[in-house]
Image: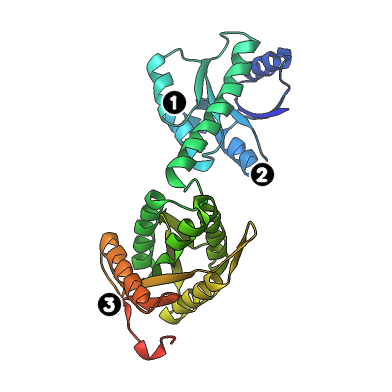
Amino acid sequence: MIKVLLIEDNDVDAQLTQDLLSEWSTEEFQVARATTLAEGLSLLSRERFDAMLLDLSLPDAFGLPTVREVHASSPTIPVVVLSGVSDQSLAIQAVRQGAQDYLVKGQGHPELLARAICYAIERKRFEEHLTYLAQYDHLTGLVNRTLFRDRLVQATARSKRMQQMIGLMLLDLDRFKLVNDTFGHDIGDELLKAVSERLKTCVREVDTVARMGGDEFTIILEGVSSEQNILVVAKRITESISTPFELKGHCISIGISIGITIYPQDDHPVDELLKHADTAMYQAKQQGGSAFHLHEASRTHSANLLP
């Protein structure tokens, strides 16, 4: 069963579309209709649909802005535009605005419409898969370097606007090379996945945990009330990672070194912030590992720091 939301104000055109889909025997379609864009978006907020058929001439919306509004409101819904205008340029622009296909009303037969919907669903799935590959680490499922940087830029902007602290952590595993050399890269990969899961349990859902590559991770803690709270999280992480991992019959013990800087006390662009966190991380390494170190520019109340 494929659930389709039809946004069409013309009764004749709506009935024709529903009749065409009912004639297609390969897939069964369940069609819900809205006569305005506002009504359609309201339905989308309450129910799950597999695809949308969208008219570009509605009582409350007209032309390409209609596609943009749908995409902004519900970016995951596959959209097939049903237009009364046969215009190749308009069709291309509609696809560029986020539609998966463009059909002219009254032209074609049930197979054309049904396949357009099915192909739109598959195109959207593939588009989302490509987006995932571009933004997430394939091994751990964590945010990758590219998306992490984007989130950090946005976080610093919010920090200035809302006058809230950001804790930026750069984390590097201790003795990870020894694990790879002793047990092999397959166990090393399993360890990275297990570490990722533990890191996520040490922070809030609103925080960002990213894998930068190799055995290096980063964390963004947004909206924290004090540097003491950031250091509490760092202590929680070092204790969690120091607990041995049981992986395929092997008991593996490692540590983690964490460099921390706090924005806006450390008021620099993101590249400088990362350098400062990296410098602090190497100072934690020099302490023998399983430690964390706060960059000097972030120290505002050193007497309150955890030991």
Q: Percent position (x, y) of residue 116?
A: 57, 19
Q: Secondary structure at mark 2?
A: helix
Decide if residue 165 is in sight here: no
Q: Nearer the viewer, residue 235 or 10?
A: 235
Percent from the top left, x then y, of residue 103?
52, 16
Q: Compare residues 267 and 281 and report the one nearer the observer.
A: 281
Above or below — where is 99 with respect to 195? Answer: above
In the drawing, does residue 59 fall left or right of residue 87? right
Q: Which mark is residue 46?
A: 2
Q: Residue at x 69, y 19 (%)?
A: 18
Q: Compared to 98, does 25 lie above or below?
A: above
The residue pinned by badge 1 equals 95
Instruction: Identify the mark nearer the N-term, 2 or 1.
Output: 2
Residue for point 52% across, 42% down: 73
Name the residue type under label 2. Answer: Arg
Q: Is residue 245 above or below residue 35?
A: below
* Cα–Cα span, label 3 and label 2: 48 Å
Tag count = 3
Q: Residues within 10 Å of mark 3 (few under 14, many from 20)?
A: some
**Drawn side of residue 109 relative to residue 191, left or right:** right
| Residue topped by disc 3 | 297
Labelled disc at residue 65? none
Callout 3: helix, strand or loop? helix
Quadrant (top left/top right/bottom left/bottom right) for the N terminus: top right
Q: Quadrant of residue 278?
A: bottom left
Q: Does residue 266 sit above or below 88 in this rendering?
A: below
- Real-space Cα distance between discs 2 and 1? 26 Å
Q: Earlier in the sequence, mark 3 or mark 2?
A: 2
Mark 3 belongs to which amino acid? Answer: Ala
- Closer to the N terminus: mark 1 or mark 3? 1
